[in-house]
Amino acid sequence: MRVCVVGCGRQGLVMAAFFAEIGHRVRCIADDPERRSRLERGELSVREPGLGRLLAFHHMAGNLSFSTALAPSVAEADVVLMAIETPPSSSGEPDLTALRRAAQQVGAALEGETLIALKGMIPIGCAAWVGMWLAEAAGVSVRAGAPARAPAFEVVTLPGPLRAGSALRDAFEPPCLLVGATAPRALEAVRALYAPWRGSERIPLVATDPATAELVPFAASAFLATRAAFSDELTQLCERFGASQADLALGLGLDPRLAGAGGWAWGERAATGELAALNRLAEEYGETPGVLRAAQATLSKRRAFTVTKLQRHLKVLKGRTVVLMGLDAAPDDGNASLPLDLAEHLLSIGVKVRAYDPEGGRDAAARCPALVVAACPYEAARGADALIFDARAAWTELDLSRLRRQVRTPFLLDARNALSPGEVRAAGFAYAGIGRST
């Protein structure tokens, strides 16, 4: 099949590589000639293990190409995959500007029967909106809910994000293939699209209506965020009571009633964007989502809790130098980054903030220009009054004794309880964890 991918972010590029790998002819639409040239040279705007190599292989093989010519690419395609980012605002309202513009361009270029597939964290109701925009652009008049002539397209949703760092694995080894479709012929077109994939024989295809399919990943993210909020509250109680958060997490994880939830992690990253979006949607329809609101309120306390830890040890923060080891910039999924949020707050109250992250430094600097991102962890630590560690990176390779010699005040805040308190103290630091009273 001929597949046209509109949107060259993580979702679009990974799916382009996936469809090329299973045997389809794929063309990716770039925004401008410069970006197309960068893609052809293998220069990606996202970091994803194995993605650049897979794209380069299929580009060289001739079954994957990049183009700026949207109209002819759409006209000759059997499937148009739209992977356009719809980042939510702080209130959860999705920004549909880019998606609407792309849908109008695709609609104006449609010829013949075409499957339009929406991929990614698709806002609830998005399939209906896109169908309307496509129909308007294609010149299809709608009267009393029925088109005057049969539209030359069907819209389906393939929801669920491809996670940063494991996007290729998510594409090739999903737990299921969730499809939102209203017409049987649209579902059959999806089956034909995935038929060459070996996983189609063992991965269940779950077919439902678009609204349900769109709701599933938001509900899953909201559940994880609620669990994260609950975990954070228990962590703080552990610190107050002198209890062991590690043993409590172990006990919860072994409880057969809770084991299916995927285990327990303190300070785990929460999909705050999706949680806010689901809250906003519930309120829009006149509901009062008490549990979801409480989870959002609890997660919003994370930054304040970290600042309180710093104040307890340093007393006055203004004029101090704090170093963030690990940034979790997450530039393209619409969710907040706790370290970056903390950095922006500390900068606003007069704290000097430096950071080190071997992977996310460039993205963090782009999102927070006032943040000084060092190329070396020991350079970042020079003259610091506090180090804040995030567990996302492999900090076991760092020499804590060497870090101690660089700092001005030997205080280390382990924001994800990833380090051994004994080893940190043996290196000469005062140690503080989350949910740990000692």
Image (cartoon, helix red, strand yellow):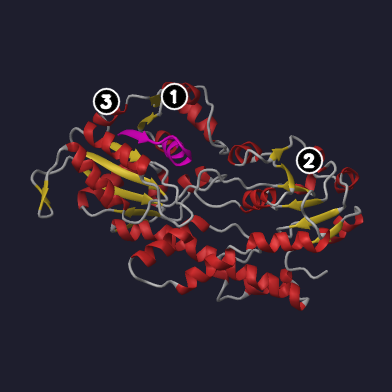
Outermost residue on the bottom side: it is: 241
Label 2 amino acid?
Ala
Task: State the mark number for residue 72.
Answer: 3
x then y, percent, for residue 206: 35, 58
Task: State the mark number for residue 380.
Answer: 2
Residue located 40% across and 60% down the image? 216
Q: Which residues are magenta?
A: 1-17
Q: Count the labels in the image.
A: 3
Label 1 amino acid?
Arg
Instruction: Specify few, some or many for label 3: CA neighbours under 10 Å numbering under 14, 14-19, or 20 or more.
Output: few
Q: Is residue 75 above or below residue 307?
A: above
Label 3 amino acid?
Pro
Q: In the displayed structure, does residue 383 sit left or right of residue 98?
A: right
Foreground mark, 1 or 2, reads 2
* Quadrant of the drawing holding the C terminus: bottom right
Q: Is residue 14 magenta?
A: yes
Look at the numbered disc 2 and give the secondary structure of its residue.
helix
Look at the numbered disc 1 and give the secondary structure of its residue.
helix
Q: In the displayed structure, does residue 124 sit left or right of residue 338?
A: left
Residue located 48% across and 40% down the image? 10
Foreground mark, 2 or 3, reads 2
Q: Which residue is mark 1?
A: 36
